[in-house]
Image (cartoon, coloured by chain):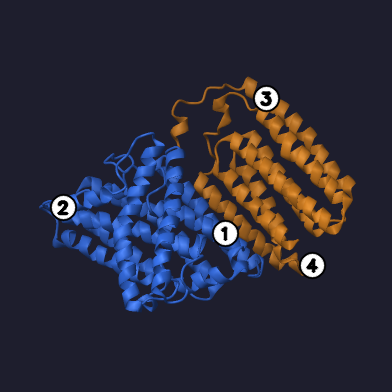
Amino acid sequence: MLFLLSVLQLLYVLITAPLIAGIFGKITERYESKVGPSIFQPYYDLYKLFNKQSVVPEVASPLFQIVPYVTFAMYMFLTLVLPIITAFPLTFGPVVDFIGGGLIFGAIASLKKIASLDSRSNYSHLGVSRASSIGALAEPIIVLIFITFGVISHTNNPYVVNNIMQTSTQWYLSLIHWFVVFAFFMALIVETGKLPIESHSNNEFGMIDQAIEMEYSGRELAFMKWGSYIKQFLLMSVFLNDFLIPFWVPMKVGLISVIIYGFIHLLKMIVLSVIFATIQSTVSKYKLFKNFEYVAVAFSFAFLAIIVFYTTGGAL
Amino acid sequence: MKDVYLIVGFLQIVFVIFMQWQVYLRKIVITFALSSAAIAVFLFVNGTYLNSINLIILAFLTIAVRGVFIPYYMLKKLKAPYKDREPRNVIPTALSIVISLFLVVVAYVVYNFTLYDITYVKAGSIPIALILQGIFLIISRNNAFIQLIGYMVMENSLFLLAGYMFPELPLIIEGGILLDLIGVVMISGIVMRLREDTVSNVIEEFEEFKG
């Protein structure tokens, strides 16, 4: 049964991740009073890219071509170990905890950057440089958040954290939890590229993630893009299921309850996408260097959570 | 009661960090008004809980003077839109946020090694942290309005400290401090207005683009 549910969760994420990206794209366009592309546009894009020929820079090593497949596989692995539509560990659940998951996310980011540098394109180097400087500030926040939750739940297992949050009103309403939620929300906006500093077109002033995959084409680009959709989906799911709204996630093994929750989870994701789109469309665009101030505030929230923990003796 | 104190106390710390982040004076003044309102709510709740009429009167005085009158007066004194923001920073904003946070840790450590043995209140470091943050807001900014707000943040923290730990403090002392503040703000406003009228208004063309 657990193996079947693992396969179900994997398919669920693979299929719905581009849909969430499509809905987000549609909402942002609607905010600009445009009709916008269909919510299924990411699927059309992926289909088109899978049918296109790949062009590889002459100077690039084989690593450049391998990385999209490796990173996509790593995203698929992460899908199997995080609480997406179940609050009980699936077959591969006990393999890694929060820190392990974070390390895999970090490894994926590093691989992408190395492959991007391997393309020898100046624009890719620009993107890698920007992504690294922002990541160097954003990653400690994520680590702090996980440590704080580790302190609360005495474990780093995301399933246990979800169960504690679902069952303990005291922890859910605690100041520590809400500081962590704010910090993670701010970090999530940075990690998913939703902060209004970034340009998602090939505009060199604002591109970060866009520049990293600039030299890719065809099937490799399709895997890179699909991987990005999955990354966004996974981070948003962890935020929703472990931090903001940990409720209704099935805690007992059962196919029907998992399927029903699959729809509920989709609704949660859509609501979060609307919030992200509202932030991105209504907050005026930052200058790139202003990002550091934003990250400093997010860090403050994460750090304050720990101070609250010690100030209150872990009671509130 | 402890829960309300903790929520309001940490809310104050977040407000100060937000003030460190902002460059627009208008937003900083409004944030100060909100933080004063939070203090007033705390005093009111504590007053009701302890059945202390003094604290309830102080809550109403706080909301009237700090929550409404002073912010309104300061917003009125702010002039043209370009005066609404402070383009020059003494310390880079990101660094000043981190320093402000560091001061909270310093306050916690210092409090635990010194005053905790007397008060036995674990969360007593919050007002001390706010005092340090207020001082830092004063020294990290050039603008006199923000420096004045930094001073008032320190006063807010004293109200938090007194409201929670020493609720029996005579009303005449706390009320006196509060009413003195009106004089301080009004005189400062006039002095700042006079200074601004004499100093050149021209801000260098590209100054706004500096970090």
Callout 3 environment at 10 Å: few (<14), some (14 to 19), or many (20+)?
some
User: Callout 1, which amino acid?
Assistant: Trp
Give how far apart the Cα atoms at labels 4 and 1 are: 31 Å
Q: Nearer the viewer, residue A226 or A199?
A: A226
Q: Marks 2 and 3: which is nearer the front? A: 2
- Residue drawn at x 85%, y 58% is B50
- Chain under disc 1: A
User: Callout 4, which amino acid?
Assistant: Ile
User: Callout 2, which amino acid?
Assistant: Gly
Residue B188, percent from left and from top: 72, 31
Lower sequence index among marks 2 and 1: 1
Q: Marks 3 and 1: which is nearer the front? A: 1
Q: Nearer the viewer, residue A203 or A283?
A: A283
Give how far apart the Cα atoms at labels 2 and 1 are: 43 Å
Callout 2 environment at 10 Å: few (<14), some (14 to 19), or many (20+)?
some
- Residue drawn at x 36%, y 48% is A23
Tell me if residue B139 comes above or below residue A228 in the rendering: above
Q: Is residue B53 visible?
A: yes
- Residue drawn at x 23%, y 65% is A70
Residue corresponding to mark 4: B118
Q: Colour of chain B?
A: orange
CB under 8 Å between callouts 4 and 2?
Answer: no
Q: Secondary structure at mark 1?
A: helix
